[in-house]
Amino acid sequence: MKMTNGSVSGITPAEMQKFEEIKKMILRNILTKEARERLNRIKLVKPDLALQLELYLVQLYQKGKLRGQMNDEQLKTILETLASGKKFKIIKK
């Protein structure tokens, strides 16, 4: 995939809409109400960081690395790491 003028080439608007719907469904399932509210507030202030966080959470879900719902405290921990630019690894217990 290549980015051109802010859009991804090779992906139709219908495919992009389907991806957005799937992403929203996944996020609704894996985040508590408080965590979803925090993510929505971040979207207003830092949309790039919110997108990065959403994609990361979807990847964790797809890889089966999330157990149960992620609460606000867990989301803040990930946010701090993403905002600082550090690399991190989720450890399964």
Image (tube, rainbow, N blue to C red):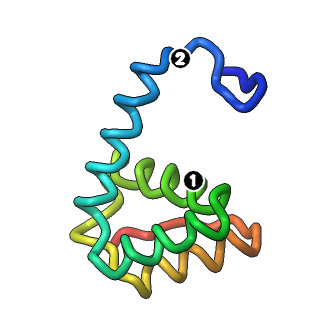
Q: Residue 5 at x, y = what percent? A: 77, 26
Q: Between disc 2 and disc 1, whose residue precedes?
A: 2
Q: Residues within 10 Å of mark 2 (few under 14, many from 20)?
A: few
Q: Residues within 10 Å of mark 1 (few under 14, many from 20)?
A: some
Q: Residue 44 at x, y = what percent? A: 58, 67
Which kind of residue does numbered mark 1 sit on? Leu
In the rendered structure, find residue 93 and report the number of the disc placed on it.
Answer: none
Q: Residue 82 at x, y = what percent? A: 66, 68
Is label 1 in a helix, a strand or a loop?
A: helix
> Badges 2 and 1: C-beta atoms under 8 Å apart?
no
Q: Residue furthest front?
A: 44
Is label 2 in a helix, a strand or a loop?
A: loop
Cα distance in 3D space between marks 2 and 1: 18 Å
| Occupied quadrant, residue 67 | bottom left
Q: Residue furthest bottom?
A: 73
Question: Observer-nearest residue: 73 or 65?
Answer: 73
In the figure, is residue 27 to the left or right of 2? left
Which kind of residue does numbered mark 2 sit on? Ile
Which residue appears at 35% of the width and 45% of the height? 62
In the figure, is residue 54 to the left or right of 49? left
Q: Which residue is mark 2?
A: 11
In the rendered structure, find residue 51 and report the number of the disc placed on it.
Answer: 1
Which residue appears at 71% of the width and 72% of the height? 83
| Quadrant (top left/top right/bottom left/bottom right) for the C terminus | bottom left
Which residue appears at 34% of the width and 81% of the height? 34
Which residue appears at 34% of the width and 53% of the height? 61
Residue 54 in the image: above or below residue 7: below
| Quadrant (top left/top right/bottom left/bottom right) for the N terminus | top right
Residue 31 in the image: above or below residue 3: below
